[in-house]
Amino acid sequence: MHQLSSSTVCLLSSSQVITAVVSVVKELVENALDAFATNVEVKLENFGFDKIEVRDNGIGICGADAPVMGIKHYTSKISSHEDLETVQTYGFRGEALGSICSIAEVHITTKTDSDSISTQYSLDNNGHVVLQKPSHLGQGTTVTVLKLFKNVPVRKQYYSTEKKCKEELKKVQDLLISYSLIKPDVRIALVHNKVILWQKNKVSDQKMALISVLGTTVMNAMTHIQHQCENPEIHIECWRRLMDPINKTS
């Protein structure tokens, strides 16, 4: 037996975190939501294997954090494991961008409200910034992922058929629909090969989000359920489909 090199370990562990196009989209959309974005656009080319771009209008990444934003286990979400008891963000491990860098080409363009212009950063496979230049994009962050699984042929081979690729695209759409329902005040759009496949505009509340996504016919067959207790503090709010009287016993 012999010890694997650090670069091989990094590649193998990253391909366990990022297993598909939908994995990349999930991590980047959650970063956008954690950055308080109200507008998130996901653009794919060739089902995401040539290009994945997630653009948001969130708070952006400050210049001081840029050199380590792609390094594994650097995060602004927590400082120690005790913070896990009160964490309120989607992501907190500092794993996403570093893992994506290991298996694809990554460019990040970002601007905070205190920056006069946005800056585009190009990252290497280890997440280090190798190039930066000014950009024309506005407030927020745009992450562009190119040539996904370029160095993981086993992953790429799995998606060698058009059927598999279409299934992956459907998974991305289903994921975005889920976020659109729990984030009614966020506009979310999905574009594939420059064609808008699906989008949901900002709405006032969860009911309006459900109507926007599912339609009024489905919503008319739903009932609103709320549950709340103080110890432990739990608040549950959901919409449930009414049972068809004919099938009550089924």
Image: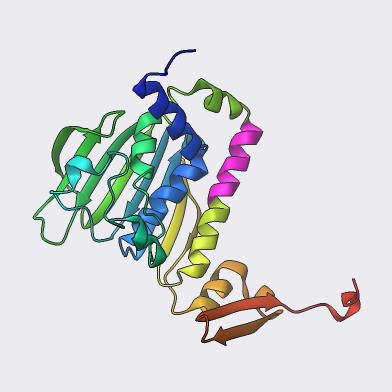
Task: Where is residue 23? Give x, y as percent.
Answer: 49, 44
Q: Residue at x 61, y 68 (%)?
A: 214
Residue 51, picture quadrant: top left
Residue 116 visible in this rendered orientation of the protein = yes
> Would residue 144 appear left or right of 230 to someone viewing this image?
left
Magenta-colored stretch includes residue 171 = yes
Answer above or below: position of 40 versus 71. below
Residue 40 locus on image (x, y percent):
38, 57
Q: Quadrant of residue 106?
A: top left
Q: Is residue 196 left or right of residue 241?
A: left
Which quarter of the figure is the C terminus placed in? bottom right
Extreme residue toward the top, this view: 1
Residue at 44% of width from left, 56% of height from top?
A: 189
The answer to which quarter of the image holds residue 248 is: bottom right
Question: Above or below — where is 229 with respect to 173?
Answer: below
- Residue at the image position 68 percent from the left and 73 percent from the top: 218
Nearer the observer, 46 or 74: 74
Asked whether residue 104 is in view, the answer is no
Figure label count? 0
Asked whether residue 90 is drawn in magenta, I would say: no
Report the side of 217 relative to 207 (left or right).
right
> Relative to the observer, which residue lies in front, 194 or 183?
183
First to last magenta residue range: 162-172
Q: Position of residue 24 (x, y in %)?
A: 44, 43
